[in-house]
Image (tube, helix red, strand yellow):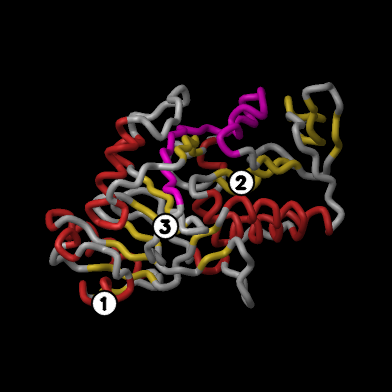
Amino acid sequence: MARSRPPTMRCAPPAWRCTESSPPTGNPDWYHPAGGLQWMRPEQVPALEDNVRRLQARGYAAEWITRTRLLEMEPDLDPDVVGDVPVAWFPEEAWLDPVPYAGAMLRAASALGAEVRIHTRVAGMAMQGSRVTGVTLADGTTLPADTVVNCAGRWADAVAEDAGLRIPLAPTHGFLVFTPPVALAVAHLLHAPEANLRPDGAGRLMLVWNDFAAAVTADTKPDPAMPEVQAIMRSVARLIPALAGVEAEAVRIGTRPLPPDGLSIVGPVPRMEGYYVAVTHSGITLSPLLGKLAAAEITTGRPDPALAAFRPARFFN
């Protein structure tokens, strides 16, 4: 989903326009420019209003629509549950389907001559003085490189043993619930008091309930029969009556590679030549843009001012 965390729930400040990562022509099967809708309980409306003002001031496409317009766009919502609250509309927001997206990126990399190795663990960095010269694999093989890019996500802080190379992280867990195919017409990213949700293809919905995610650990066994899963299904069924009685099809728990200050970490590590880092929460959402900016910096050697606030240097004083 295209948000980070309530109440701002968008790219971490200073905000990037996430739509810069959108394909210039045509839409591949992994890119879904659906737009996003958000509303809150009456006591939370001031926070939403403040967020919309802040985003508008940064040029982010954000506007207000009426409840009538919301129900025209999402006719399967229960009007009484939505209530009489202002609704924010973010027309340029999109979601990426991670499985076909990852497959497309791997095929593109292979077509450009990259060697893709799967089931291959990096055990550490190869060093010559203060320069990273490659990576050492778990089997002892060393792969030389002019520049090593650490984009290992949740495990980015475990790739290097040297304190001068280690990236600090404060990971959190995400809890996703997937419905079976259902006969309804949810078409947009929805951020509602009951849950966050979006289409997931083939008539399925993906649901996120942050109230429960805080209690999830890496040892939590995902199971559609969990009481918490039943609770989120009941919560969303109040908003979307067509889901009444529908059982969850699948549950997934993921670990977010969240930097300690909540902002992305992108750029060269200070005092270390040949070592570049790209780690962030919302990695799927931001990766098309981050990949473009990082590739340009690495190949040209010219820093991009859009990344100035996200440099690793802030953790290596």
Q: Nearer the viewer, residue 32 or 199?
A: 199
| 179 falls in the magenta region | yes
Image quadrant in which you'd find residue 123: top right
- Give left or right: position of 31 versus 236: right
Range drawn in magenta: 153-180
- Give left or right: position of 202 versus 64: right
Residue to which mark 2 is pinned: 278
Q: Is residue 150 above or below residue 76?
A: above
Image quadrant in which you'd find residue 68: bottom left
Q: Earlier in the sequence, mark 3 or mark 1?
A: 1
Q: Nearer the viewer, mark 3 or mark 2?
A: 3
Instruction: Identify which amino acid the numbered label 1 is placed on.
Output: Arg
Asked whether the beta carbons under mark 1 and mark 2 sit within 8 Å of each other, the answer is: no
Category of crowding for the residue at label 2, using alpha-carbon neighbours closer than 10 angstroms: few (below 14), some (14–19), many (at least 20): many
Q: Is residue 242 above or below residue 253?
A: below
Residue to which mark 1 is pinned: 69
Name the spot of residue 95 as percent of width and height, x first. Answer: 49, 60
Q: Earlier in the sequence, mark 3 or mark 2?
A: 3
| 142 falls in the magenta region | no
| Spatial separation of the CA atoms under disc 1 and disc 2 | 39 Å
Residue to which mark 3 is pinned: 198
| Spatial separation of the CA atoms under disc 3 and disc 1 | 18 Å
Please indicate, yes or no, whether residue 161 appears anywhere in the rendered image: yes
Please indicate, yes or no, whether residue 13 appears anywhere in the rendered image: no
Q: Residue at x 25, y 50 (%)?
A: 194
Q: Earlier in the sequence, mark 1 or mark 2?
A: 1
Instruction: Identify which amino acid the numbered label 3 is placed on.
Output: Arg
| Spatial separation of the CA atoms under disc 3 and disc 2 | 26 Å
Q: Is residue 86 above or below residue 274?
A: below
